[in-house]
Image (cartoon, rainbow, N blue to C red):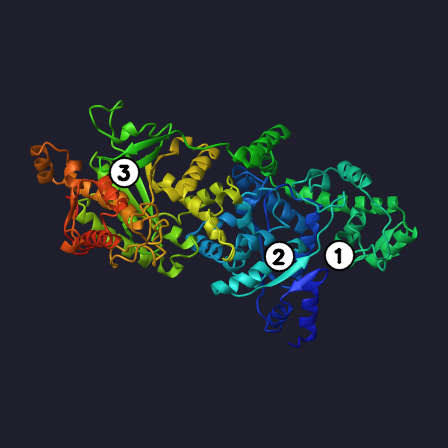
């Protein structure tokens, strides 16, 4: 698009002294169309702002003079996520401090601030809309891509915290929620800008343009950081301190712009003093003369070349820089102290050195990988709990909530006083309901007979975060369908008093989302990685790393005493206990009851999402199973008999009053009566076969007295009988 002279001058003002512009055509089009352009610049409220902030501030001054609306985002949530940065308790006061000194900087540069707005990140980043967009974003971006995007702005450690990986996602997403046309930042954020350009359109969000200013080296030659004291000149430093820091700064002779040792800009990063002239002094003094030792310089090149030739001494450069900075800083400090609350804000935002040392020690303890990586199990002792139906469950005690499996039972032999417990079973609507789910319901049925309160929690979000096994748009309907199926099954099990809850009732509340960020700040990416990652599959999205976080959140939200889990969730239970301990929530650690896995038709653990190999309660008949004559190892039909059918027979008989009476009349236990079944066979195959228990069934099969076809027919008939009972709403277990 062709711009007229006024528009071209406006664009030149917008882009001058920038190192790079991504989306120049979009910017040009908006200028040509006369659009009211809106740009944002974000700064994490961590350490105290330093003179390096003059670089973006003088550029923001250009934007405001070019009649651009500018929003400055005080990214307090970003600060919390950045490893080894501010603790959450200091953020509010640090936001106030940042706002005060940045306004003072702009006033010192005589910048009109009528179109300048300040926004605090947590004012919108904890809303339901934002959180939903973030989680959708997490379902798109892999850990590898997010790590690459944040490499320049998030502190890098060997075993990084999960929270740091959310940093670049939030920054990209801020563009949409601040409703801006472009984002301004340092060139160190280029990879985050690329992430935004590539990923946001996948969420039906518009691409923005991105404006990047160069990074200013600190006095030591490295990147100036508000969190690294020795590399910066603080905005509140005294003139003596400023002079001393400049005097001690390295100022080696620079190569010429044509030298192979020079950078693209002709400024070596090892010379912090000369870099200040290029990135700070010259742009701010663009409309005034720069006079050093009586010589007038009209450009940075002239200053640099004079210094390289030896015509301009190091001491002369430093003396000018001292006067320049002290003049600006005196104005900044005067403006700040005009606010009667400023000293109080400073004291609260940046406590005394003793308190800071204590806080740093606390932060190091909270983020040290040696401290976070607990040796051994974070859970307490493991016991075995045997049901009356031939099943064996693992009981992992909680030293505070449920320290012994004796708490489960209200028998006279119990060593502890019985009290009703809150038992939670968390279910994700990832696929179809299988007999694996039904087996868990049988366990809950047994536990309910002791008077415990049973809650089934449907976590639609977990189903999405786990490789989008439930698409985002189907989460609500899938959870509702699961609830419908569950209520039908619960009626058949005489368990209508069981509470069914949806995590969607609370999982987007601001306090819940803040707790998510806090938990993400105490676990490493390695700890939250999926247990099994196929080498043939693409890298898992970040959402997979959030699955254990939301499990822990749900456990805490529902104040469970005991959580029923599958054996495949053992690692998640371990991590939940670690998270609670790291956040000083040890009293919230529940006990875990771990049920053994049921096998699918392929001999592997039955999964709701592997439809070729599971048994769907509400839809399927029995499928082809693997078995060979006489083979009792890796025999799916036998395993289903041992782990599902025979325990079901016993539990059903135990709940049947008439069956219990008949057993007593025969001098047998309920379990003995229940286990006696008849396997129908044709006369030529030996006729019907009666077995008293599973052990006898297994023995007959091993001796090849029972053919695989007859065993399969028996298993299929029994399963179909159970399925038909459930589908037709009849009582399965009274």
Where disc 2 sits, the SS reads helix
Q: Can residue 76 be seen in this view?
A: no
Which is more foreground, mark 2 or mark 3? 3
Q: What is the quadrant of residue 477 in the picture?
A: bottom left
Give the answer, above or below, for where 243 lies relative to 16.
Answer: above
Q: Which of marks 1 and 3 is nearer the N terminus?
A: 1
Q: Name the residue: 60% across, 45% down.
A: 98
Q: Mark 2 points at which residue?
A: 191
Residue 391 — which label? 3
Q: Name the residue: 67% across, 67% down.
A: 11
Residue at far bottom of view? 2
Q: Mark 1 points at which residue?
A: 283
Which is more foreground, mark 1 or mark 2? 2
Q: Nearer the viewer, residue 334 or 65?
A: 65
Q: Nearer the viewer, residue 109 or 349?
A: 349
Give the answer, above or below, for where 406 lies relative to 20.
Answer: above
Q: Residues within 10 Å of mark 2 (few under 14, many from 20)?
A: many
Q: Do the residues labelled 2 and 3 touch (CB within 8 Å)?
A: no
User: On the picture, is 489 further left or further right than 557?
Assistant: left
């Amino acid at each position: 698009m062709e711009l007229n002279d006024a528009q071209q001058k406006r664009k030149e003002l917008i882009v001058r002294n920038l190192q790079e512009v991504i989306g120049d055509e979009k910017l040009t089009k908006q200028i040509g169309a006369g659009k009211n352009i809106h740009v944002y610049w974000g700064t994490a409220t961590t350490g105290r702002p330093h003179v390096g902030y003059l670089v973006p501030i003088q550029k923001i001054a250009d934007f405001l003079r070019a009649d651009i609306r500018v929003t400055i985002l005080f990214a307090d949530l970003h600060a919390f996520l950045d490893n080894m940065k501010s603790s959450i308790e200091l953020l509010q006061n640090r936001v106030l401090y940042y706002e005060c000194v940045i306004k003072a900087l702009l006033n010192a540069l005589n910048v009109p601030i009528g179109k300048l707005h300040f926004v605090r990140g947590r004012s919108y980043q904890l809303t339901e809309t934002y959180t939903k967009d973030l989680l959708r974003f997490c379902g798109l971006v892999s850990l590898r891509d997010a790590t690459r995007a944040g490499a320049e702005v998030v502190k890098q450690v060997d075993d990084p915290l999960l929270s740091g990986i959310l940093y670049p996602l939030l920054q990209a997403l801020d563009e949409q929620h601040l409703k801006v046309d472009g984002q301004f930042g340092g060139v160190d954020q280029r990879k985050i800008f690329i992430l935004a350009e590539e990923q946001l359109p996948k969420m039906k969000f518009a691409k923005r343009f991105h404006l990047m200013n160069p990074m200013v080296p600190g006095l030591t030659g490295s990147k100036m950081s508000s969190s690294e004291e020795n590399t910066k000149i603080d905005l509140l430093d005294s003139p003596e301190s400023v002079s001393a820091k400049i005097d001690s700064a390295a100022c080696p002779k620079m190569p010429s712009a044509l030298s192979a040792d020079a950078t693209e800009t002709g400024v070596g990063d090892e010379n912090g003093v000369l870099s200040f002239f290029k990135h700070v002094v010259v742009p701010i003094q663009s409309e005034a003369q720069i006079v050093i030792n009586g010589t007038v310089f009209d450009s940075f090149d002239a200053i640099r070349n004079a210094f390289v030739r030896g015509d301009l001494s190091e001491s002369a450069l430093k003396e000018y820089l001292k006067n320049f900075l002290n003049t600006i800083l005196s104005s900044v400090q005067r403006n700040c102290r005009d606010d009667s609350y400023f000293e109080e804000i400073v004291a609260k935002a940046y406590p005394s050195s003793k308190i800071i040392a204590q806080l740093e020690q606390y932060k190091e303890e909270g983020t040290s990988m040696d401290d976070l990586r607990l040796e051994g199990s974070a859970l307490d002792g493991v016991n075995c709990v045997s049901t009356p139906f031939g099943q064996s469950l693992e009981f992992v005690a909680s030293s505070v909530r449920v320290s012994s499996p004796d708490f489960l039972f209200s028998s006279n032999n119990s060593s502890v006083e019985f009290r009703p417990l809150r038992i939670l079973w968390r279910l994700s609507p990832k696929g179809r309901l299988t007999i694996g789910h039904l087996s868990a319901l049988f366990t809950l049925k047994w536990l309910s007979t002791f008077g415990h309160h049973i809650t089934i929690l449907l976590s639609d979000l977990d189903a999405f975060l786990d490789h989008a096994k439930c698409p985002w748009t189907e989460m609500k309907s899938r959870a509702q369908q699961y609830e419908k199926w569950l209520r039908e099954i619960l009626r058949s099990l005489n368990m209508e008093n069981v509470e069914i809850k949806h995590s969607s009732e609370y999982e987007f509340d601001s306090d819940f989302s803040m707790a998510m960020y806090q938990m993400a700040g105490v676990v490493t990416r390695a700890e939250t990685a999926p247990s099994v990652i196929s080498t043939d599959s693409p890298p898992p999205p970040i959402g997979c790393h959030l699955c254990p976080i939301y499990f822990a959140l749900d456990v805490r939200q529902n104040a469970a005493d005991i959580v029923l889990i599958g054996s495949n969730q053992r690692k998640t239970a371990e991590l939940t206990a670690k998270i609670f301990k790291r956040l000083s929530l040890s009293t919230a650690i529940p006990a875990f009851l771990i049920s053994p896995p049921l096998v699918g038709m392929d001999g592997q653990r039955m999964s709701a999402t592997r439809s070729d190999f599971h048994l769907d309660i509400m839809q399927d008949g029995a499928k082809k199973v693997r078995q060979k004559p006489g083979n009792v190892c890796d025999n799916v039909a036998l395993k289903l008999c041992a782990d599902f059918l025979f325990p079901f027979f016993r539990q059903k008989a135990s709940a049947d009053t008439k069956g219990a009476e008949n057993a007593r009349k025969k001098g047998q236990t309920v379990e003995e009566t229940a286990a006696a079944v008849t396997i129908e066979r044709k006369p030529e195959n030996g006729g019907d076969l009666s077995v008293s228990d599973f052990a006898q069934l297994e023995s007959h099969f091993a001796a090849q007295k029972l053919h695989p076809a007859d065993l399969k027919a028996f298993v299929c008939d029994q399963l179909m009988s159970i399925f038909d009972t459930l589908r037709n709403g009849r009582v399965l277990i009274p």
